[in-house]
Amino acid sequence: MAQEDISFTDLIASTIHDMKNSLNVQISELEKVAAQCRERGDTQAYADLGRVIYQSNRMNSNLIQLLSLYKLGKSIYPIDISEHAIADVIEDGLLQSRTIMEFKGVTVSVECDPGLYWYVDRDLITGVLTNALNNAYQYTADKILVAARVVDGMLELRIEDNGHGYPPHMLLQEGIAAAKGINFLSGSTGLGFYFSSQVAQMHKNGERHGALTTENGGAFGGGCFVLRLP
């Protein structure tokens, strides 16, 4: 029997999946060691492990984004846009980021009406939030705000920090098209922005579709990652 052909992209996707699983095991073990360091009062080792765990989580997020983009490109991603409580979606994203926030002593506050419901793909939007929180973690001094509200008939999700703001090359104009101009060689967050822009574009209602914006200012005067969904 002839060996079944497998495309290079399929092989890469399978390899990424294995890498992601191995990385999850490593992160879990590192978090256990970090907890032991904290219990012993070894603050330096705890802080050092925190930086390693942050980078591992960021890599894991990138691998998940690559797999999602692969499945979207192959039209095999099980897109499920249905009504969800946005406060619950935000909590999903925070759960994945809570450990690294504790390492840096970052306070994360949430502003979201518990009665706010919207039609979204919960897993994809959680992925966007995780990416935005990873970016905010990198730039914040010690505060992050996650806010959700309805503006002009669109759900607006904002992740704001109290850092120095986004550098010029990471500022995006309103709309999906702006994200296509990102140079992946100019910074490590290009993949995250591209993934987020694709997720935004998938959310449509009539002639309106999602949009991704980054700006500076907000409640803390730092960087603002803004996702708008119809």
Image (tube, grey):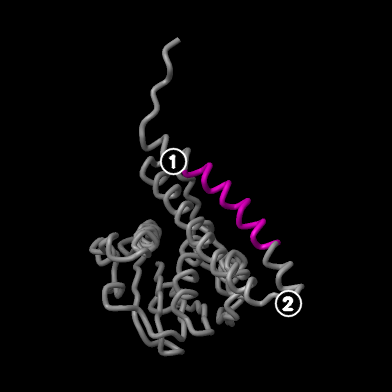
Amino acid of disc 1: Ala
Q: Which residues are magenta?
A: 16-32
Q: Is residue 25 magenta?
A: yes
What residue is shown at x 60% (from left), y 81% (from top)? 105
Q: Quarter of the image for the N terminus: give it.
A: top left
Q: Which residue is mark 1?
A: 13
Please determine whether, in this image, residue 202 is positioned above or below residue 224.
above
Figure quadrant of residue 76: top left
Q: Position of residue 183 (x, y in %)?
A: 25, 62
Q: Position of residue 15 (x, y in %)?
A: 47, 40
Q: Residue furthest top?
A: 1
Q: Which residue is mark 2?
A: 41
Magenta stretch: dominant SS? helix
The answer to whether any part of residue 203 appears in the image is: no
Mark 2: which secondary structure?
A: loop
Please determine whether, in this image, residue 14 is positioned above or below residue 154.
above
Q: Position of residue 206 (x, y in %)?
A: 34, 60
Of the two numbered discs 2 and 1 on the same chain, state the one appearing first in sequence: 1
Q: Nearer the viewer, residue 40 or 160?
A: 40
Q: Position of residue 117 (x, y in %)?
A: 55, 69
- Residue 86: give its label: none
